[in-house]
Structures are given as C-alpha cells and as structure tokens.
Image (cartoon, coloured by chain):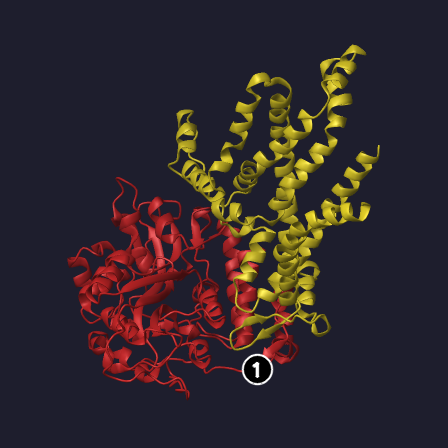
Amino acid sequence: MPRRRFLKTGAGAALAALALGAGADGLLTGCSSDLADTGTVPLPRQDHPVTWPVYPGNAAIKSGLAPEQDATLQVYTWEAYINQAVVNSFAKKYKTKVQVTTFNTMNEAVSKLRSGLSYDLLIGATVDVLGQLIEGQLVQPLNHSYLPNISQAWPDYTNPFYDQHWQYTVPYTIYTTGITWRKDLVDENPYAMANPWAMPWQPKYKGRVAILDDYREGICLGLMKNGLFDLNTTDYRQIATSRQALQDLNGLVNLRIDNNDYSEVPAGQTWITNAWSGDMAAAASYMPKGVNVDVVGYWFPPDGRGPVANDTNAVLRSATNPVLAHTFLNYMLDLPNVLENISWNGYMQPLTGVTPQVLVKEQILPPSLISTAVQPSTFRRGLFELQLPVDADALWQQAWLVVSNGI
Amino acid sequence: MRNKKNAFYIALAVPGIIWLAVLFVVPVYAVLSIGMGKLNQMYEAPVAVWNPFSWSSSNVIDVWRDLFGSASFAGPVAARTLIYVAIAAVLSLAIGYPAAYFVARFAGRRKALFLVLLIAPFWISYMMRMLAWIDLLSTGGYVNKVLGWFGISPVNWLGGSSVAVVLGLVYGYIPYLILVLFAGLDRIDPALIEAGRDLGLGRFRTFVHVTLPLSRQAILAALLITVLPMLGDYYTNQMLSGAASTSMIGNLIQGQLGTPGLEGQGAVLSMILLLVLLVPMIYYVIATNREAAR
C-alpha cells in the first residue's frame, strides 16, 4: 500500500489524531512519496522463516572448481570491520591479492551495488537488507561444498530463520544492544534496577547521556523503556509512545546522539548509553592512560530477551572470482582466523569455539566485560530488529527525525 | 574585427561555462529530479524523474508541512540554525574586523607575514581542527585544566552546548571573513582617511565616517562568504555537540539523505536551502552593482 494511502486510511487517521494530541504533526508527514515500484519482499521473522527463491540465471557455481589464479579478490565491507592482518594472511596462503573497499551505511552499499559497482564479496550485510539483495539478484546462491567450515559455526546458522538452508549467506558477526555505564561515575547498577532500559532517563546525568545514532536502536530503546518488546512493531501508537519517551529523555538530559560509544564511554565523555556489545568489547583499547577498563559496565538482559543481531557474508552476483570468494568465506569461518579477527574488531563471530571463556583466556575480552559475549541461546531467544513494511518503516523514520532534531 | 574580438571573449568563457554546467547545473538538476521523483518501494530508494512534466509534488508538500505545518519539526530546526548563524556572524565580524583592519592599516612590512598567519588554519583540514577542539574541550582537556588553575570546576563543553557549536562555527569560518575584509580594507585609499583627519575628525569619527562606509562592500562580501557555508554546516555541530537540542538544518538534511525512503525529502530541503541562500547572494550582486554605478 502506498505510504500516502496508508496515512489516509484508518491507521493514518488514528495516527493523525494521536500526533495532533501529542503535538507532533511532523510524524505524519514525509510518508507520501509516489511509488515507482510496487514490488515487495518477504519479511523474515523468527516465527516466520523465509526460504529465498533461486532465480534462473543466478545459480550457484559448480563444485570442484579451483580458485581463480592471479586474481584480485574484491571485498566490499563496512569501514573498519575486518582485520587487515586476517586479509593479508588469506592473501599469503592463497597467493592472491585482496582489495578491500569500504562503505559507511548499508543503504550506501546497496545503492552502489544496484548502480552496477562490481565486487566479489559483501562482508557484513545486515539481515534487514537480505530481501533487497536476494530479490534484486545482487547476491548469488552459495555452493556449500566450498564451505566445510560452516561446521564450526553454531548449528543455528545452517538453517537461520532469515535464510533457510543458508542458501545465500554465512554468518559474520553477532552482537547485542545493551546498556553501558561508567561504574565509577554512575551510582546505579542496571543489574539491580527494576527496569534497566529506563536507566538513561535520569536528569542528574544531564549532558552525560547518549544514545546510538540509529533509528531502529533509538526507537527500540524507547519501546523497551515502556515495556514494549515487539521490536518490529507496526503499531503507530507504540511508535508514538517511544518517540514521546525519547523526546522526554532529550528534555531531561540534553541527549547526545552518535555512534561513538566505543570511545566516549572510555574517555568519560558519556556515562550512560545504549551500546553495541562489539563496541564495548573493544573498550579496553580506548581507555585513557591510568584508567582501568573495569570501570566500564555492559548490561544485557540475563534472560536474553534484548536486541540481538547478526551480520552476514555473501558472494555477490557480479563476482569475477566466485571460487576465491567462497574460499575467503570459508577462511573467515575457521577458528584461528576468527579469533584474530575478533581481537581487532571486537565483534564476536558465532563459532562453537568462540566462547566467553576462550575470549577471556585469549585476552581478547576483559573479564569485566564478559557480558558482551553472545551465547547461542541469545540467538534463539533474543529480539531481532528486522526489515519492516515500507509504511511502518516510514513511521519509525519520521519519529526518529523528530527525536534526533531535538524537537 | 569587432566580431572576431567578441568571439575571442566568448571562447574565453567556454571553459567556465562547461565547468558551471557540469559541476553545478547538472548536479542541481539531479537533486531536483530526485526531490520531485518517486520512491522504489523494494529498495526504499529514490527514483529520479528527469522529465519535469512527470514530476511529483508529494515530497515538496511533505517538506512544507515539516517546515510550516501546525506542529512542524523542521521549522524550529531552521529557526535555531538562523539564530546560531546570526550570533556566529556577528561574533566573527566583531573579532575579524579589528584583525583585518590591523593587518591592512598597521602591519607595514610584516603584512605578508600576517597574511600567511591568517591563511595558516587552512593548512590543516577542517575535520582535523575540529578533532583538535574535541581534545581541548574534553572533560580532562587543556581548557578544563586551565580553568582548574583558577579553581573553576570542569565544564562539560561537549555535552550538547549551544555555546560550543556557535564558537565552533566562528572558529571554523572566521579566516574566510578576515581574508575578504582584509582585501577590502587594503584597497581603501589612505588619502581619503588622511583627508578626514585633515578636516578635523578624530580617529574614531574618521573610522565611523570614512573607513566604515568605504568598507561596507567588503563587510557584506565577508559576511556572505561566511554565512552561506555556516547555514549548511552540519559537521561542526556533529563534532562539538552531537546533541539533538543543537541540531541544525544541515543535520536534518544529512539525516534525511542518509535514511532510506527519505532521500527525496532531503533533496527538496536542500533545494529550499539553496533558494534561501540565493536571497543574500542576489542582494550582494545588487549592492555591488549599485556601488559600482556610483
């Protein structure tokens, strides 16, 4: 349903009334672009897994092929999301060159791939864009015979709900979103609080509270603060409730919105923030001289009912070195390489050999931040922020614009 | 002969025209086509519509509501931007005019040295200069250390302060203002100032009645060259505050352009900002022509 029509029908009218009452008409606006393409993609959910189609002309490569010789493997990934040492060791082992090109947002990556930019691999694709990548035929199905190291991954990843039978993806990183706080500067301990998601709402920490600059994470925080745990809600009232909570938070603490949690918390610039576990796992690298990493705390619900996400790796359809690309994916599922990657990246990879104990033993993770490690049970019980229907997504985005511009 | 001369001058303009067409007209039309375009539902991505007869006004209507609707959220951001920029411009002028005046009138043989010093900030990228300020203004930074010597407790400069944003704007753009002002003040004929003194005016009155009116065009140009980029600035706020309460129109546009599905509105808002910026530009052109006609 086109956005404008959505807003003109019942739900929209109800939202209009709500927004008028809440004094945020802006929430309603901006949802009315004319639509050029009415195509929709299935929306995977944990209780509604999706098996993606394999399109004619976009089949997996044949088995038994040798990796391309004298090739340059083109890797497309997030800025600072892969350990160059691991890339170099792969290049050395397979006597090849590897060129890493980076992007800053998933939106940017998908746009550039659609425009025809050609790479072999997409490293770190978020689950919410898989539909666009697959139905847009930007990625190709995997040939599992090249990926024996999948046996090292958690068993869940041989049949994840977002890509049944792992036809197109292998897992890359897995992380949670929790609450980080400075134990030496903040009186409260979220583990002792009735509602730790409400921890940022404390005026005494004015100027010291931040939240992630991500519309999904932001609105989800507002939802969870209000005891709402459907993180893919399309209910306009819940979205408005979250928006109002975040506006209140802004009034209380002069809220800062950025993604610098990994450096600002160690520096003492931010005392309380929602944070990605991978960022906080790397906090030790950013601590000022003389300040122990033990002062940084990370809370995630002990029962695992909090935001969890994993990124994926895929071979692009435009790959000119598809066998080498598969070989690289397999290499990135091998425990020693994975540990080396985590030691630089901070973000955990879901291999059975990557346990909290191993991470501490290998001195990759400080014991005080063991709560940043993700367990297989979290993947099953955690709350995924997944792709939304276009109309609902527009409501989330508009609510976030209102919050992030301090109105 | 005259025709040949004309052709020669037209030929001289060709590179500039091509430059303008490729790097200004085409990009602006592309932004316009996205703003007046459609949305690809599957990718939540804008689809540029190049034919003006097929343009859609929905993004314009949405942005108009955001700006001027009964409970607009972009309107207050625009108002906040204007206030910040106005204060920053006045501060820049108050600091920059004496500096430019000193270099133009009293630097003597050291004029070149002072000019180099004025240009020195440009040797370091804007981002690096702002990162340096983050270090200086952080809780344990040098600014708070100096305050500590006087018994003043640390100030949370980077905790979402309007003051930090305005001072950041002043710091970031003041070299442009000083350079333009210097160029204008340096061209004032000293004989005119001496004439004012000879006619019995004191230093202050000479300045008010001779120097200041003669530097009016330079002030206008200097303000223009600093105010225009300040109005579209988003980086200063992002680096020195990051708070929602100090968000400027540039941040709003950046947010929209970075959000799937909202790029079209970001494009429209950019075009509106461009139109608003044209007003002082046109005023400057008219004022310059009027001055030249005197």
Q: Which residue is mark 1?
A: A38
Q: Colour of chain B?
A: yellow
Q: Which image quadrant is residue B155 in?
A: top left
> In the rendered view, does A124 fall on the left or right side of B98?
left
Residue furthest toward the right? B294
| Image quadrant containing the C terminus of chain B | top right
The picture places residue B184, in percent across and down from the top left corner, at 68, 29
> In the rendered view, does A28 fall on the left or right side of B198?
left
The picture places residue A112, in percent across and down from the top left corner, at 47, 67
At x 62%, y 47%, the residue is: B231
Q: Residues within 10 Å of mark 1 (few under 14, many from 20)?
A: few
Residue furthest toward the left? A361
At x 44%, y 63%, the residue is: A105
The reply to whether residue A379 is in sight is yes
* Most foreground residue, A202 or A300: A300
Question: Compared with residue B87, is residue A4 higher up or lower down, i.e. above or below?
Answer: below
Provide the secondary structure element on which disc 1 rests. loop
Q: Amino acid type of disc 1?
A: Thr
At x 46%, y 79%, the residue is: A136
* Most foreground residue, B161 or B199: B199
The picture places residue B34, in percent across and down from the top left corner, at 62, 67
| Image quadrant containing the N terminus of chain B | top right
Chain whose colour in the figure is red: A
At x 33%, y 71%, the residue is: A313
Q: Which image quadrant is residue A292 in?
A: top left
Residue furthest toward the bottom? A56
Question: Compared with residue B69, is residue B8 higher up or lower down, i.e. above or below?
Answer: above
The subunit letter for the residue under badge 1 reads A
Marks counted in the figure total 1
* Most foreground residue, A67 or B250: A67
> In the rendered view, does A271 fall on the left or right side of A390?
left
Question: Compared with residue B47, is residue B127 higher up or lower down, i.e. above or below?
Answer: above
